[in-house]
Image (tube, rainbow, N blue to C red):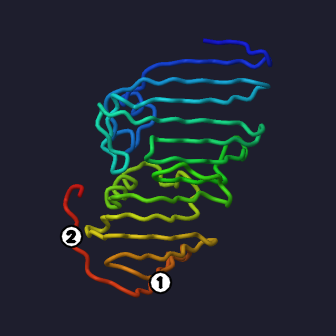
Amino acid sequence: SIATLPDRSLSVTASGQVTAQGLQAVYPNAFTRALSGSSKWNLGIGLRKKLANLTFASNLQGLGSTLPAPFAKRAADSLPLRIERRVQNPQQDRIEVSIGQVASANLLRQLSGDVMQVRQGTVQFNGPAPEPSHEGVWVEGELPYLDLDAWRALLHAGENGEPPLPLAGVHFRADTLDFLGRRFNRFHLNAWRQANTWQATVDGNELAGEGSWRGEAGGKLTVRLKRLYYPDAAPERGV
């Protein structure tokens, strides 16, 4: 439906159903291939002076996901998804995303040529994403379990090698982390990028130390370990 508001702006509302098959046809990648089923959605658009704000919402009920944790879900389960776009000015906008209590994002975009590109942002697990205050995208939060091997396999299966966001730093804790076929417990990672170099500190039951990765000239990895205990093999599936 379309309505004209007292301030002469237009309000457009729509609803429909999204299917995994439709998403896979439009966005053929490893992420959409992990989806199945369908779910209802609602869309609201506000138009004023040729600028559009929009809100997309769905409870994702009926849509199943075999993505690694924490984004796996049964089709029968409800997981509220909300995506909002708010225009700051013709050259800037803000994208806010929330997926239940699982994860949220707050992204500031700037027009570069004909494309809106993320300049600043935060991604938060198990809580609301804070206001961005630094260049690049910063990821924070705590997870009970993270299968990094499963995520690496998923990302390597993608057709586009470009990073989706300009990642600048990661600060997270995981009670259990599976990586390189091994299981790490009470794992804490703090990593940040400086120019073309990544610095990181790690701490956990099996591993503690610091390191750096310099990307130029084929790459150079430097590691200084304070503690290393050979971790147990990770189970083949899940925890």
Q: Residue 173, how many percent across, how many down?
A: 42, 65
Secondary element type, mark 1: strand
Badge 2 or badge 1: first in the primary sequence: 1
Question: What residue does disc 1 label?
Answer: 222
Secondary element type, mark 2: loop
Residue lying at 68% horizontally and 36% vertically, measured from the top left: 86
Disc 2 to disc 1, how far (Cα)?
Answer: 25 Å
Q: Residue 133, how many percent across, how many down?
A: 68, 58
The amino acid marked with disc number 2 is Ala
**137 left or right of 38 in image:** right
The numbered disc on residue 48 is none
Residue lying at 67% horizontally and 30% vertically, measured from the top left: 53
Compare residues 80 and 1 and report the one nearer the observer: 80
Q: Quadrant of residue 153?
A: bottom left
Question: What residue does disc 2 label?
Answer: 233
The amino acid marked with disc number 1 is Thr
Residue lying at 77% horizontally and 37% vertically, measured from the top left: 90
Question: Local crowd at mark 1 within 10 Å, few (<14), some, or many (≥20)?
Answer: few
**6 left or right of 26 in image:** right
Q: Which quarter shows the C terminus?
A: bottom left
Q: Residue 137, how many percent across, how many down?
A: 59, 57
